[in-house]
Amino acid sequence: MRRLMMLACAGMLSLTFHSHAQIKVGISGPLQGPNSGSMLEVVKGAEIYFNSVNDKGGIGGQKIQLLARDDNFEVDKTVAVVKKLVIEDKVTALLLVRGTPHNQAILPIIAEHKVPLIGPSTGAMVFHKPVNPYVFNVRTAYQLEAATLIDLLKTSGMQRISILYVDDGFGKDVLEGLKTGLATAKLQATAIVPFDRTLNSKDSIDIMKPSMTEALKGDPQIVIVVGAGLAVKNSLLAIRSSGSLATLATLSNNASTAFMKLLSPHGRGVIVSQVFPDERSLTSPFVREAQQTAFKAKVSLTPGMMEGYAAAKVLVQGLRGAGSSPTRASLVTALDSMKAFDLGDLVIGYSPTDHTGLEMTDLSMITKDKGFQR
């Protein structure tokens, strides 16, 4: 991870160092700064899988070169980074681009250049319906995750639920899912409060307090905070400083070791929804494979790495079906023909009319010594 951080400071990670690399894959996301921790884990998950494939000869003798570039989690920079990856670097595919508005902003680029985007690191419904011919989702849709979160919270005895959400495409998309879940559970939120997206990158409890004061009206048992890690941390501290006994819950975009470290020492009891299996599972074939790959790479498997590992597996399966010299077009065709790919107890399939991806949601709680406890 230290090597990853050092390379991130240079603004670009070239994660496979083979002089004969022939298949280029591009990633854009926050690789430095307050929101970089979880992204670095996601990238690491993809890296260890690609390197394991390269060590076995690559794709038909061609090695995969992963180009991960920092966009500081700013939409304009994401657009600039992706343009360079697509036009100058001529990547065969984009992978795991981070953020809902960021991915929305690059849709015209991928449409113009017909470059596939696999596993965008967002679950927004706009990437699921209507089906985009070049976007192949891997993670669960946010609306399904959010609705399931409400159901699981109600089952756990939580009836008074408040919502604090970032006022952007991500937050509004999750809000729709939360509202669906509330309606199905025959519950009403005690409060629904938006906050400005700029607070995602400002490390201040005070600027979150006014929004949290509104969110705590109605004496909720739990406040669901929809936002990036820094905003969630400051929301948690605002709850604690108010004297409220409310629990905080958040979504899978914060399901990373870096997020737990960000909350430390205040994170105990925070609930985080999960859309990939527990990285410590002894029964999941998918997890066991990832554990073995991480062990060989001499890294510790983390929750955030599971998303990167899964997306990389899906991409490689597509490349293997895309001919002896995969192109953007042949990769799209191969992915559209991938009916039921078993990642190892997770099955994903696509067709020209369905690019949905996985459908799983689980609850976890941050504990004192054991990280995310399912």
Image (cartoon, grey):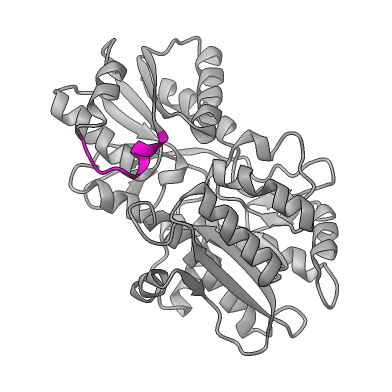
Number of numbered discs visible in the structure rendering: 0
Which one is nearer the viewer's eye here, 336 or 208? 208
Q: Position of residue 370 (x, y in %)?
A: 28, 52
Q: Position of residue 18 (x, y in %)?
A: 60, 87
Can residue 41 be seen at all in this image of the molecule? yes
Can residue 97 be seen at all in this image of the molecule? no
User: Quarter of the image containing the N terminus?
Assistant: bottom left
Q: Residue at x 62, y 77 (%)?
A: 65
Q: Is residue 255 left or right of residue 28?
A: left
The quarter holding residue 341 reads: bottom right
Which one is nearer the viewer's eye here, 105 or 352? 105
Q: State the residue lying farthest toward the bottom.
A: 19
Q: Position of residue 131 (x, y in %)?
A: 77, 39
Q: Is residue 140 left or right of residue 351?
A: left
Q: Residue at x 72, y 53 (%)?
A: 110
User: Quarter of the image containing the C terminus?
Assistant: top left
Q: Is residue 314 magenta?
A: no
Q: Residue at x 77, y 50 (%)?
A: 111
Q: Is residue 149 above or below residue 179?
A: below
The quarter holding residue 55 reads: bottom right
Boundaries of the magenta span: 197-205
The quarter holding residue 166 reads: top left
Q: Is residue 340 above or below residue 188?
A: below
Which one is nearer the viewer's eye here, 247 or 92? 92
Q: Residue at x 13, y 23 (%)?
A: 243
